Amino acid sequence: EFDRICAIDRVGFKTRRFRAVYRRDAGEGALQAALKQLAEDVEAAVRDGVNIVVLSDRAAAGEVPVPSLLAVGCVHNHLIRAGVRTFADIVVECGDAVSPHDFAALVGYSASGIYPYNAHACIRNLAARGDLDVTAEQGIANYNKAATAGIVSIMSKMGISTIQSYQGSQIFEAVGISKEVIDPYFTHTLSRVGGITMKEIEEDVELRHSQA
């Protein structure tokens, strides 16, 4: 299904895939530079008629994935400031989203679709090892159903009854994130106490990359 979305190119619909990654050897500030370039590339594509934007964190050797929520928030808010946000939907191909909260946050910051390829790969691996009582296909279907139910549950606790009202609403409060991150990437999100900076996020992302 995801591959079919990526291949859409017909009258009224045009898809383009963007890689949300950066080179590990690019030095300090590489994450911020990658986000700036990603936002500019997506804006140019939308102005060129692309109306399905796919953000992918699949990385090659020597590349570090950009956190998917940071990439979505960056692109979403940049397109709003550029005045072209309503011309395109955002689909996310990500390995770091696994829980209902992860998915709810992505939708809350305007993702129209999510392909959690890493979670699906883990389910296939468990099925192949015989650790599941169902096939890989059924396991993935169960996971997708549970993830959707989780998003709906989070929405209902906020008093929101439709996905259209929830999508892009940014109805979250950030805990422990600095103003330098909130203002450009999660614009207007409430953050009362401040916290981590882009430098610290980059260090954390690269630490996980090294451990992997």
Image: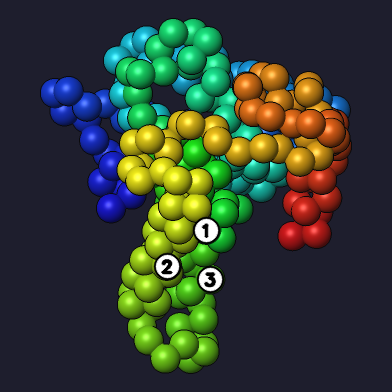
The residue labelled by disc 3 is: 122
Residue at screen point 46% across, 87% down = 132
- Foreground of the two, 151 or 18: 151
Residue 98, above or below 161: below
The residue labelled by disc 1 is: 100
Viewer-side label of 3, 2: 2
Category of crowding for the residue at label 3, using alpha-carbon neighbours closer than 10 angstroms: few (below 14), some (14–19), many (at least 20): few
Residue at screen point 31% across, 48% down = 3
Residue at screen point 83% across, 31% down = 194
At mark 2, the secondary structure is: helix
Q: Earlier in the sequence, mark 1 or mark 3?
A: 1
Going by the numbered disc 3, the residue's amino acid type is: Cys
In the rendering, which numbered label is found on residue 90? none
Question: Are the residues tagged 1 and 2 within 8 Å (C-beta)?
Answer: yes
The answer to whether residue 44 shows anywhere in this view is no
Residue 180, above or below 19: above
Category of crowding for the residue at label 2, using alpha-carbon neighbours closer than 10 angstroms: few (below 14), some (14–19), many (at least 20): some
Q: CA distance from mark 1 to mark 2?
A: 8 Å
Residue 67 is situated, as x and y percent measured from the top left of the image, at 65, 42
Q: Is the C terminus in the top left, top right, bottom left or bottom right quadrant?
A: bottom right
Q: CA distance from mark 3 to mark 2?
A: 16 Å
Decide if residue 12 is on the left or right side of residue 20: left
- Residue 40: quadrant of the picture: top right
Residue 86 is situated, as x and y percent measured from the top left of the image, at 35, 18
- Foreground of the two, 83 or 3: 83
The residue labelled by disc 2 is: 146
Decide if residue 20 is on the left or right side of residue 159: right
Q: CA distance from mark 1 to mark 3?
A: 16 Å
Going by the numbered disc 1, the residue's amino acid type is: Pro
